[in-house]
Image (cartoon, coloured by chain):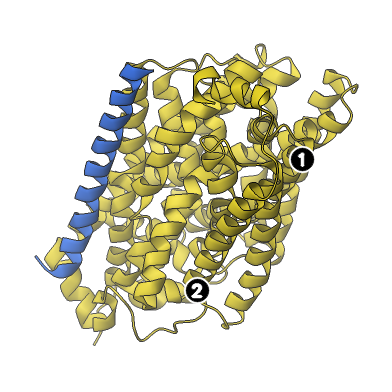
Amino acid sequence: MDRNWIAWWGIVVLSTVFTAIGLAVRMRRWKNE
Amino acid sequence: MNNFLPVPQPDISYGVWAISGISLMLLVCILLGFFSRKKSSSFESFLSGHQDIGPVVTGLALGATWLSGWATLGMMGITYAVGWSGMWFAGMWTIVGIMPCLFFTGEKMQFYAQKFGARTVSDALGIRFDSKVVQSLSALVMIFFMVLYAVGQFKAGATIWYAVTGLPALWCLLLSGVVVFIYMIVGGYTGTQWSLALQGALLGIACFTLGIAALRFVGGPAALNMQLSMQDPKLLDLVRRDLPVVGNTQLFSSPFGIVATFFIFLTMATGFPHNVARFLGMRKMSKKDFALVTLMVFLVAGPPIFLNAITGLCSRAVFGPEILKIQPWKGDLAAPFISILAGGKPLTILYVTGVFAAALSTLSAMVMVMAGNVTRDIIHIWRPKMSHAVLLRLTKVFIGVFLLIPFYWTFKKPPELLAVFMGYAAIGLGGIFIFCTAISFYWKRATASGAILCMVYGVMASLIGGIFVTRQKLGMGTLEFIVLIGCGVFYFAGSMLTKPLPQEKLKQIFGEKNV
């Protein structure tokens, strides 16, 4: 796989992780509200 | 030496099928409009519904308003024109933009709607700062930038009509305008919210399917890059250092410009009032509701949009630079034409309907926000005795006015590349409202003076800076930082140097225990 596709997949994976972490943090905060 | 395939000639049979697909979508939307019409009889409910809209509809609608003609057409135009280096500005940061809007701004908007009866984003800001001036000024600023953004939606809708019918530009524009006007007038906010949800689902499926089909058509990832390399090795560069580092090409030609694309996307979803307004009509969310909204937004705004950059590259590999010669649509025709070759009529109808859904959903949401801004945040606030029946009628008149302005603009001087043109509005709205909306909902010390200074600076900097960028004196990435950092400086300094809201007021807004 060349660097262009690695960069593309990198952003796709990071965006998914970003969403999962964001949702998890938001859910955690929910308990304390 | 190049074996490019000929650019498809618009063919009436495609036009007829596309009209059928779009008509079906609009029929459903108009039915939804009529269905909700009985409910939207008052001025307030016309603007923001009845706060009873569920999480799936809100999530899909948020996805649809976030993704406009820029996402479904303009992004492909960018990678088509400059190659892989266009990827950064072609929506790869989509999730980085929309998720913070959902996580941080959504619940606050809902809070302002439910506790204080906010009906527009400016209304919420007026309540937050206890200032009529902030409310009216923010409405004007939003209108200013959204007119620019609306021009882009008209061009997207019209480009699609051209791709499938080959009709003259004026006819393509007229078709877009008439359709939006009809469906806005009969629907109101609730109808729009339901229609938006339908359109969000449709555009997500369309872009995802097109991306996969286009990649298969060129023979897969390796074959795509090989064909691009044979055409011009620079198309493979992740940073196009051969392009000028001033003007809009800075976003593709320098690491500085590429970092700026990250910040443009990060701030603009929260800065777009038509996105944030989606939460005004939503019912109180449970944890499960919130997870569902997040999932819906991710499904619509994630994978389909990541693939858009690839679709544009596939189009470049197949057609070479020929599409750039077609006036006035140019690179924005990259995606519709590859859909004709890669998927024939079924895919083209799906895609064309999807783009139309995206452009119309954003345009109608913005027109609704602009019309509401004038009646609620400018007229009603300074003339509170005006009857609600007159205000409702005025809102409908302004819907027409705010459709005609961008329509005329697109007709007189259509923007070259959608994404770049709409980028200016994104820089302005994002730079200003990331502070005035998102941060102010959490930072108690923010004051009306800070917000006013931030808005005035943001508009001036975007306007003057935009002129310098188009004259190739300044990079578009540099402009993003000038606007964003400057807005931040004016907002924080202006707030710290002036008196905060009284404790009583702050307790109402932020809660007893938080003050």
Q: Chain letter for mark 1, please.
A: B
Give how far across and how far down residue B355 sits, in percent: 46, 46
**Amino acid type at image mark 2:** Asn
Chain appearing in blue on the rendered image: A
Up the image or down, B366 lies above or below B381; here it is: below
- B454 displayed left or right of B283: right
Q: Which residue is mark 2?
A: B248
For marks 2 and 1 on the same chain, the one whose residue lies earlier in the sequence: 1
Residue B479 sits in which quadrant? bottom right
**Of residues B328 and B370, which is closer to you in this image?**
B370
Kindly identify the residue that appears in the image at 72 percent across and 33 percent down: B372
Residue B394 sits in which quadrant? top right
Kindly identify the residue that appears in the image at 40 percent across and 41 percent down: B100
- Tell me, yes or no, whether the two marked residues, 2 and 1, touch with CB atoms within 8 Å: no
Give how far across and how far down residue B126 sits, in percent: 70, 33
- Per the rendering, the mark at residue B136 is 1
Chain appearing in yellow on the rendered image: B
Give how far across and how far down residue B332 sits, in percent: 46, 63
Marks 2, 1 in one chain? yes
